[in-house]
Amino acid sequence: MADYGQLLQQAQELFTWTQALRRHFHQYPELGFQERQTAQRVAEELTRLGLEVHTGIAETGVVAVLEGCQSRPRVMLRADMDALPIQEANQVPYASKHPGVMHACGHDGHMAILLTAARLLAERREEVPGTLIFLFQPAEEGLGGAERMIQEGVLERFRPEMALALHLWNQRPVGWVGIQEGPTMAAADAFTIRIRGKGGHGALPHLTHDPVTAAGHLIVALQNLMAREVDPLDTAVLSVGQMQAGRAFNVIPEEAELQGTLRTFRAETRSHIHQRVRELAESLAAGYRCQAQVTWEMRTPALVNHPEMARRVREVVHRLWPEARVVPFRTMGSEDMAFFMERVPGCYFFLGSANPEKGLDAPHHHPRFDFDERVLPYGAALLAAAALDVLRNPPV
């Protein structure tokens, strides 16, 4: 079996190929469940590698299977494919050709990395001690692509026993790797609070039940709730992102509406805050002679790394990339890879991709997002090496 240094060397030799893939995907971005050209290119590349390719899963999802010298164990490697509804501001030769759509979260890099990992592993097919499942998922950006693939039976059909995935991270430079045991990305919930009162003239507030005043006090009270009812050793974030009320400067409206998001790691904390937000909204609104209705939408569960899988991936990074700075890392961001990892133990890790000296450090979901492509061979070699490592000696 080739050692990890050889994997990295080969990935670096393939850099021009990998970069061309990434730039192609970047030039032709597509939104969730619309990744038809993207999926076609992914399927073509996988077919050229001699893999068993399946398309049309959850509209545009692609899965390829590489069976090595034995059928088990089975590990799934996943990349997301969708872009964002953002107008790109970068002036680069590979800028988006689709107005109002761009890859502003690194999914173009994720696809190029996974295709390169598939190429590295396909060339070692006879040395692969198990089965590799390469899954290219549509609609990660809040549209439920992972859930849709699961609902359509992708896990029963391909039967992965372990899972691996990575995310480029533009808040850290190339050479930084974040791997966390246990909770790694937060559960994401959306809430809507409607406060109904009695409208009237702005000059006669005593004849109204003002929902705007109630909403303003509620925004502050929600932050106090988080500060006083979440264990300081736990972590949770509640943010109000929208407030809508009224259409005229001199009219107190009948209704005000708040919308926001809650991020948590622990199921108990999540449940407690759901209950307390409802109680607080209803009681505070009543104090202002209004009524409140709270609606929760539970979008994504917390992403939890299997401790032994995370430890093994960390060891692979140290062996393959000794000069890398490997640190524990978790974020209040969310990822629907969590739906897969609720059912399949795995490890999801982060690779620094920024280069401030070259101006490649805009945050994710920004019109100027771009990353240092030097990270691509490292991502491909790490995914390939981690897959081989867990196949040889399954940690779960």
Image: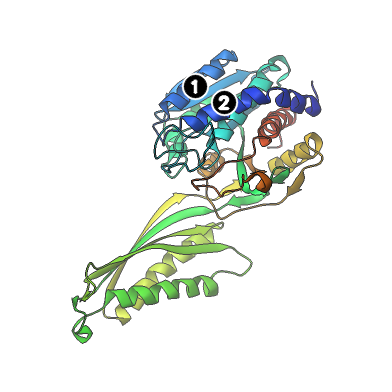
Residue drawn at x 79%, y 21% as measured from the top left: 2
Q: CA distance from mark 1 to mark 2?
A: 9 Å
Say which amino acid is labelled 1. Arg
Residue 217: x percent and y percent?
38, 77
- Tell which tag, 1 or 2, sits nearer the viewer: 2
Residue at label 2?
21
Residue drawn at x 67%, y 26% as measured from the top left: 15
Disc nearer the start of the sequence (1/2): 2
| Nearer-the-camera pick, 271 or 164 | 164
On screen, residue 287 versus residue 341, left or right, reads left
Look at the numbered discs 1 and 2 and tell me whether their residues touch, using CB distance below 8 Å.
yes
Q: How many neighbours does mark 1 have within 10 angstroms: few (below 14), some (14-19), or many (20 or more)?
A: some
Say which amino acid is labelled 2. Leu
On screen, residue 196 versus residue 112, left or right, reads left
Residue at label 1?
41
Residue 301: x percent and y percent?
50, 49
Q: Quadrant of residue 324?
A: top right
Question: In this orientation, does residue 305 appear?
Answer: no
Residue 327 against residue 371 in the figure, above or below: below
* Secondary element at tag 1: helix
Residue 89: x percent and y percent?
48, 43
Quadrant (top left, top right, bottom left, bottom right) of the C terminus: top right
